[in-house]
Image (cartoon, rainbow, N blue to C red):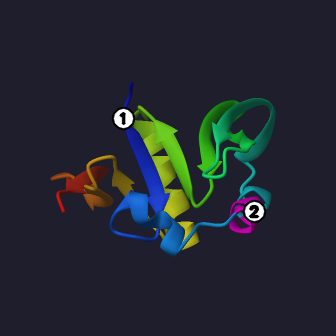
Amino acid sequence: MGYDLHVVRTENWFDSETDPVTKAEVDHLILSDDSLAWSTADYVDMSDDDGIVTRYYLICWNGQPTFWWYRSEIRCKNPDESQVFKLLEIAKTLGAMLVGDDCERYELGRSLFGRPKVVSRQP
């Protein structure tokens, strides 16, 4: 098991289908960001509500499979700090927000010395 972060447009990630981040939007994001690309080899097979298995290809960041688009959101399992910063950038670009499995919201803040830092706020 791990802990996922979710790029969504809803306060709770499990409600993301009510205002989805669409595949077309992710395609556009990838075309506009040279550090992102669809993987051609790395994927997750997921069983949809109707029992049909759908293959979801991962999104490579700087050549490494890092994120994945799943139905209505972008996810990352156990992200490191640099991945969290990239997810925040992606969320801003998509007009979305970054939330954790427990629905806490992640935002970009500033440290005492003015450096960017990640801040999480509980719901």
Q: Residues within 10 Å of mark 2 (few under 14, many from 20)?
A: few
Q: Which stretch is magenta?
A: 23-28
* Residue 88 visible in image: no
Q: Residues within 10 Å of mark 1 (few under 14, many from 20)?
A: few
Query: Within the image, what quadrant is residue 33 found in?
Result: bottom right
Q: Nearer the viewer, mark 1 or mark 2?
A: 1
The span from disc 1 to disc 2 (Cα, nearest Å) is 28 Å
Return the x and y of residue 86 as percentages of the image width and height.
Answer: 51, 49
Residue indicated by mark 2: 32
Query: Within the image, what quadrant is residue 82 found in?
Result: top left
Dot 1: element = loop
Query: Within the image, what quadrant is residue 105 found in?
Result: bottom left
Residue indicated by mark 1: 3
Of 46 and 122, the residue lying toward us = 46
- Give the left or right position of residue 34, taking residue 21 as reference: right
Dot 2: element = helix
Return the x and y of residue 56 as percentages of the image width and height.
Answer: 71, 42
Quadrant for the C terminus in the image: bottom left
Residue 120 in magenta stretch: no
Residue 26 in magenta stretch: yes
Amino acid found under the numbered disc labelled 1: Tyr
Q: Residue at x 27, y 59 (%)?
A: 109
